[in-house]
Image (tube, coloured by chain):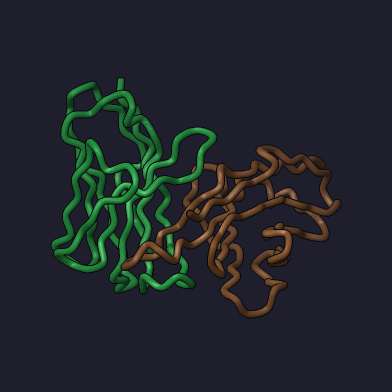
Chain colours: A green, B brown
Amino acid sequence: NAGVTQTPKFRILKIGQSMTLQCAQDMNHNYMYWYRQDPGMGLKLIYYSVGAGITDKGEVPNGYNVSRSTTEDFPLRLELAAPSQTSVYFCASSYSGGLSYEQYFGPGTRLTVT
Amino acid sequence: AQSVTQLDSHVSVSEGTPVLLRCNYSSSYSPSLFWYVQHPNKGLQLLLKYTSAATLVKGINGFEAEFKKSETSFHLTKPSAHMSDAAEYFCVVSDPLSGGYNKLIFGAGTRLAVHP
């Protein structure tokens, strides 16, 4: 049971390039989330999904896209990278959307856009 | 709207001394509250959670937190710090108005340093 896995661990992009951050979970969780963490700040929600084929925007969705074709995978797409997207990105999953259900986090992807 | 404030951005203690990380929340409803820990270059791990049962919540690695509604606080404590406790700690509140998913609102974090 690997939990939540993310690839790559680190990436440097040039302005205007695109990339996909991969996220997978093997816990059969319906809910999945993408967060970004900027220095000295808490995590901000980018997008979330309540099940395969269903996604919705979080607090900071601009510049990102997601898809959820399977229960296990929830990739995050950056189309035109900008310096403001330099951050650490965390994927998470939870069994349910209920308030008491904890979210399980992946190890993160550290992205630098120059 | 829900919000959470971590009162200290950095806390430094000596090994073997008590740890206190302070968190205040703002909520119009009975909240669910969490403490997560993030070790360097790692993902976040749940330490403990409060979900309207016992007000004193015990978590992993000897940590505990007490929910005090009158003070709107959820401070994290540990009787005796260990070197391995050095990490970033996040106080988190669930937003019951999010409608459809478990929206988590994170504090800015407290970095705990433990000295020999």
Q: Residue A48 occupies which quadrant of the picture? A: bottom left
**Closer to us: A73 or A31:** A31
Query: Where is B108 relative to A101, above or below?
Result: above
Q: Quadrant of the C terminus of chain A?
A: top left
The total of numbered circles placed on residues is 0
Residue A9, how many percent across, how many down? Answer: 36, 42
**Quarter of the image that includes the N terminus of chain A:** bottom left
Q: Residue at x 18, y 63 (%)?
A: A54
Residue pictured at 82% horizontal, 48% vertical: B15
Tell me residue A20's x, y (percent).
20, 42
Most extreme residue toward the bottom is: B53
- Residue B53, x across and y down, in percent: 62, 80
Is B64 left or right of B13, judged from the image as shown? left
Residue A65 appears in which quarter of the rendering?
A: top left
Above-or-below relation of B8 to A45: above
Taking A75 as reference, is B32 left or right?
right
Q: Residue at x 18, y 29 (%)?
A: A80
